[in-house]
Image: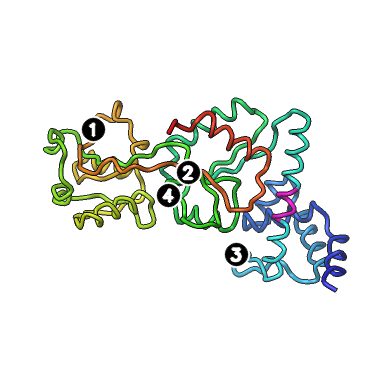
């Protein structure tokens, strides 16, 4: 019975209807979906009306000025996303067989990776100008949510989840160092004990940050408690706060150019730098597109540092 009903829906549903539906669900707006697809709003509304007639159930409900997916809409969105992704992969595979590299790459990275990811993508796009790239920069918690929903092609983070549900590989060093304002009394000292660092007002990244997890783990292992003065969710704000003399912090060294950011200095602290790596990965079992696989190979060849 299920197979017969499914085939009936497939016969009455067009690919264009799925494109319109997915755009509305993703953007939360009929108007914005129409703009993205270069359609008129009446056309978008008509496509959804026909799709709801094919399904036999409403797909959206409006509460106030916001629209939400119904239970049937949630089910259809999963199928529509799979169908549209498969069609995009087919386009890229055909182009690859023709000796072309065209298509799209959706990359999501944690906020700290924004300091190098655009440069890496720039080099990749110069090699493959036919590729359209989307870069999403967000915090670790949000990135994990995007991975669970399989929103993007690939993900870059400093501390991947220890789970068989994901496949990650390291590609670059990501050491964490202690940073203080230039002229700080500790700037001239060597091999500073962790206990001495705990006496300084400390600026910590927000909960869920991979950098924070690494720092808290190190100090906990040595039974040293930090004197946290404030918590901030931006590396740039933390650097400005340090430069303003409000405390010291521990940051990924890739976020700082000590050659140009003269107001900051790296302290020589015991057990630092904390050795970390940058990782790139995706949900286990995911079928990577031709472009995503090409980007992975590019990272291995052009970006990875020798071990």
Q: Which mark is residue 279?
A: 2
Q: Earlier in the sequence, mark 4 or mark 3?
A: 3
Sequence order check, earlier mark of 3 and 2: 3
Q: Give the left or right position of residue 287, taking residue 203 as reference.
A: right
Q: Which mark is residue 159?
A: 4
Secondary element at image label 4: loop
Mark closer to the chain start, 1 or 3: 3
Name the residue tied to disc 3.
Answer: 65
> From the viewer's perspective, is the residue at label 1 or at label 2 nearer?
2
Spot occupied by residue 147 in the image (x, y as percentages of width and height): 55, 54
Q: Gap between marks 2 and 4, in whole Å?
A: 7 Å
Q: Are marks 2 and 4 in contact (CB under 8 Å)?
A: yes
Residue 220 inside the magenta-drawn segment:
no
Left or right placement of residue 261 versus residue 82 in this view:
left
Q: Where is residue 251, by image quadrant?
A: top left
The residue range painted magenta reads: 81-86
Question: Quadrant location of residue 224?
Answer: bottom left
* Relative depth, front residue between 276 and 263: 276
Q: Which residue is mark 1?
A: 263
Q: Is residue 44 above or below residue 37?
A: below
Alpha carbons under labels 3 and 2: distance apart: 40 Å
For marks 1 and 2 on the same chain, the one whose residue lies earlier in the sequence: 1
Q: As rendered, which of 196 and 121 lies closer to the eye?
A: 196
In which quadrant of the rendered image does the C terminus lie? top left
Q: Nearer the viewer, mark 4 or mark 3?
A: 4
Disc 1/disc 3 C-alpha distance (Å):
48 Å
Which class describes the residues within 10 Å of circle 2: few (<14), some (14-19), or many (20+)?
many
The tag earlier along the polypeptide, 4 or 1, is 4
């Amino acid at each position: 019975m299920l197979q017969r009903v499914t085939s009936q829906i497939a016969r009455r549903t067009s690919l264009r209807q799925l494109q319109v539906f997915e755009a509305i669900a993703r953007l939360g707006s009929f108007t914005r979906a129409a703009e993205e697809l270069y359609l008129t709003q009446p056309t978008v509304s008509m496509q959804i009306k026909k799709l709801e007639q094919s399904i036999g159930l409403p797909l959206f409900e409006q509460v106030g000025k916001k629209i939400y997916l119904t239970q049937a809409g949630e089910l259809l969105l999963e199928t529509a996303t799979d169908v549209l992704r498969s069609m995009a992969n087919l386009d890229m595979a055909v182009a690859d067989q023709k000796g072309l590299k065209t298509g799209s790459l959706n990359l999501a990275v944690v906020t700290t990776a924004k300091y190098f990811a655009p440069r890496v993508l720039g080099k990749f796009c110069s090699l493959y100008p036919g590729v359209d790239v989307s870069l999403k920069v967000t915090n670790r918690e949000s990135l994990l949510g995007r991975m669970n929903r399989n929103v993007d092609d690939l993900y870059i983070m400093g501390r991947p989840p220890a789970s068989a549900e994901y496949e990650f590989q390291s590609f670059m060093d990501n050491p964490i160092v202690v940073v203080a304002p230039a002229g700080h009394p500790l700037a001239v000292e060597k091999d500073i004990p962790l206990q001495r660092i705990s006496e300084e007002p400390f600026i910590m990244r927000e909960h869920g940050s991979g950098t924070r997890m690494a720092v808290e783990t190190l100090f906990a292992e040595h039974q040293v408690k930090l004197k946290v003065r404030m918590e901030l969710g931006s590396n740039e704000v933390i650097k400005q706060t340090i430069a303003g003399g409000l405390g010291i912090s521990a940051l990924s060294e890739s976020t700082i150019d000590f050659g140009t950011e003269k107001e900051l200095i790296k302290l020589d602290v015991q057990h630092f730098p904390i050795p970390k790596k940058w990782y790139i990965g995706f949900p286990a079992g995911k079928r990577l597109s031709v472009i995503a696989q090409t980007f992975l190979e590019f990272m291995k060849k052009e970006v990875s540092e020798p071990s």
